[in-house]
Image (cartoon, helix red, strand yellow):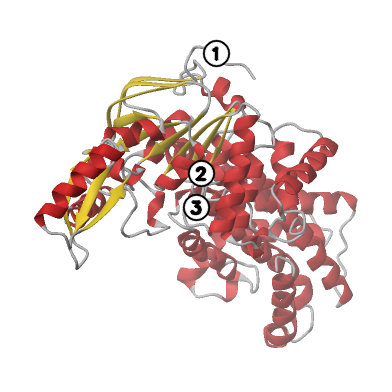
Amino acid sequence: MTYTKSPVIELEAVGKRYGDAHVLRELDLRLPAGVHALLGPNGAGKTTIVNILTTLIRHDSGTVRVLGLDPATEAHAIRPRISVTGQFAAVDEVLTSHENLVMMGRLLGLSARAARARAQELLARFDLEEAGGRPVSTYSGGMKRRLDLAVSLIWPPEVLFLDEPTTGLDTRSRRVLWDQIRELAREGTTVFLTTQYLEEADELAEQIAVLDHGRIVAQGSAAHLKSLVGAEVLRVSNESGDVVRELPTDGSAGALARASAEVAATDPRLRVELHRPTLDDAFLKLTGHAATPERDDEQGAGDDRDATPARELSREFNGTGASR
Amino acid sequence: MAVILPLMLMLIFVYVFGGAISPSGAYLDYVVPGIVLTAAGFGAGSTAVGVSRDMTTGTINRLRTMPVPSATVLVGHTVASLGRNLLATVVVLLAAVVIGYRPSAGVLGWLGVFALLGLYILAITSVFAMLGLVARSPEAATGYGFGLLFLPYASSAFVPVETMPGWLRGFAEHQPITPVIESSRALLMGQSPGSDAVVAVLWCVGIIAVAAALTAYVFPRRVAR
C-alpha cells in the first residue's frame, strides 16, 4: 500500500457539453488515494465524469489526469490500471457467471487455467458459487451487480470506478457490495464511486464531493459537510407536529437549558427536540434541493444527458418540497 | 435454433412443396443449396441482435475501459456466426443425405462448396453486424435484417428463375444470392460452376468490403457517442 503525494484523480476547469446542454462547467476536483464518493442527484453529471475519467468520452475543455495520465490521449496506458463497473451490468446473460469470468480473464490475457482459477476465487468472494453454473439470465439484479463487480476485479485495478453501484438494489445486496468495496479499500485500491444515496457516501467514503449542475459545490469528509450546516439546533414544534422554530445551540447543557427556558416562556405546550445535522441537511443547504430523488426511476437513472429537462423539473419539485 | 430452423425449412420444401414443384422427385437435389443459404441468413440475423445488444448495454463500454481492442466485439460475433452457420450447414447436408440426397462432388468440389458458403456467410454476417451497429436497439436490428431474409426466395434457391414473371426474374438473376446458389449446386453435382463462381465471389467480396468500410466508419462514432 503506497500513498503517493500526487493526486490519483485530477480535474481542472473541466467542461463538457452535449449540444446546448452544459453537463460540466469549470469543474475542479483533486483526489488522493482512498475511497471517494461523488454525490449528486440524477442529471448532475456524475456518469459524465466517470466516462471522462475512464477514457470513454473526451472532455471539451480543461485538464484531466488519472494516475497522472491524460485519458484523452493516453487511454492505452490508463486502461490496464483501472476497472469500471457501470450502471448497467455488462455481463453476458446467456453464459454462466463462471463462463463470464473466464471469458473476461482470457480477454485480459490470462491462461485458460489461470482464468478458471481466478473465476472460482471471485465466485467464492462474491457469494456466487452456488449460482456459478446457472446462466446469468436467471440471476437477480443484485447477483448481476455482484458478478459485474467481480469481473472488474479479475485483474486487480489501481483505481476502481463504480457508477451508482447499488442503485435499485435490495438492502441485502447493497450490504454485500458495500462489504466488498470496503475490503478493496483495505487492500489499497482507490475507489471512486458515484451515488445518489447519502447513506452510501456516509458509509463508504473518506471524502465526499457534492456535485450539482455540473459543478462541485462542496468537498470534504462527511463530518465536515455536516458541519457546514452548523451545530445542533433545538427544533421547536407545536402540538400538531409542525416545526415552528429552530434555535441554534452549541450542544452544551447550559445552552440547551437557556434555549428551552426561552421556548417554555412563549408556550409551555411546545415540544422540543435536539436535531443533529445529517448529510441530507448538508446537501439541502449546499444545493438548495434534496439529494434523495423524489422519483427514483431506476432505468432513467442511466443517462445523465437525457435527464437534463427532467432535472429542472425535479429541482422545482424538490424545491417546493423542501421549503415547508 | 440455428440448426432446427433450416431442417424444418428443408423438410417443408421437400415434402410439402416439392411434389408440386417437381413431381419427378429430383427437387431435393435442386433445393439443398438454397436451404443452406437461407439458413445462413437466419443464422447471421442473430449477429445483428448480438452486436446491437453489446452496443446498447454496458458490454462495449466495459471492453473500451479494458486493455482490449473494442472491435473485439465485432470480430467475436463474426467468428461465432461463421462457426454456427457452418455447423448448421453440415447438419442440413447430413440430414439431406439421410432423406435421399446424393451429391456427386469430389474432394475439390466439397472444398469449393465450403469455401464459397463460408465466404457467403461472412458476407451476410458483415452486413448484419453493420446493421446491429447502426440500430438503436436489438429489436430495431431484427427489423432491419428482416428484408434480407427474403432475398433467397426471390432467387434461384427454391425455383428456377425462368418460372418467375419478367420483372422479378430480372431482379432474381442479378441479385447476389443466385450466383452463389448456382455455383454451390453445380459444385455439389460434380459440375463446373463456370462464370457463376466468379460472379459469386465478386459479390461476396464486394459486400464484405462495403460492409467493412461502413463498419469502420460507423463503429468509432457509435462508441464515442
Q: Give the crowd class for mark 1: few <14, some 14-19, many >=20 residues within 10 Å.
A: few
Seen as rendered, the residue at the extreme left is A266
Q: Is residue A110 above or below residue A85?
A: above
Horizontally, residue A283 falls left or right of residue B134, namely left
Task: Please identify, in this view, whether the residue under mark 1 or under mark 3 is nearer the observer.
Answer: 1
Can you give x and y, in whole percent of width and height, for residue A245 in the image?
A: 15, 51
Dot label at residue A86:
2
Q: Amino acid at mark 2?
A: Gly
Query: Relative to the observer, which residue lies in front, B33 or A197?
Result: A197
Q: Amino acid at mark 1?
A: Thr
What separation in Å lies between label 2 and label 3 (alpha carbons)?
Answer: 25 Å
- Mark 2 vs mark 1: tell me if same chain: yes
Quadrant containing the C terminus of chain A in the rendered view = bottom left
Classify B102 as above or below A202: below
Which residue is drawn at the image coordinates 63% and 42% (left, top)?
A180
| Residue topped by disc 1 | A4
| The one of A134 and B82 positioned closer to us in this rendering | A134
Question: Which kind of residue does numbered mark 3 sit on?
Answer: Leu
Q: Chain of mark 2?
A: A
**Which residue appears at 81% of the width and 65% of the height?**
B91
Do marks 1 and 3 share a subunit?
A: no
Q: Name the mark on residue A309.
A: none
As displayed, is residue A142 above or below residue A276?
below
Q: Tag 1, which secondary structure? A: loop
Residue drawn at the location 85% of the way across and 38% of the way down: A113
Indicate which disc residue B131 carries.
3
Horizontal and vertical percent for residue B165?
A: 50, 75
- Residue A193 coordinates in the image, percent (x, y): 48, 37
Of residue A178 and residue B184, the one placed in the foreground of this image is A178
Disc 2 or disc 3, which is closer to the eye?
2
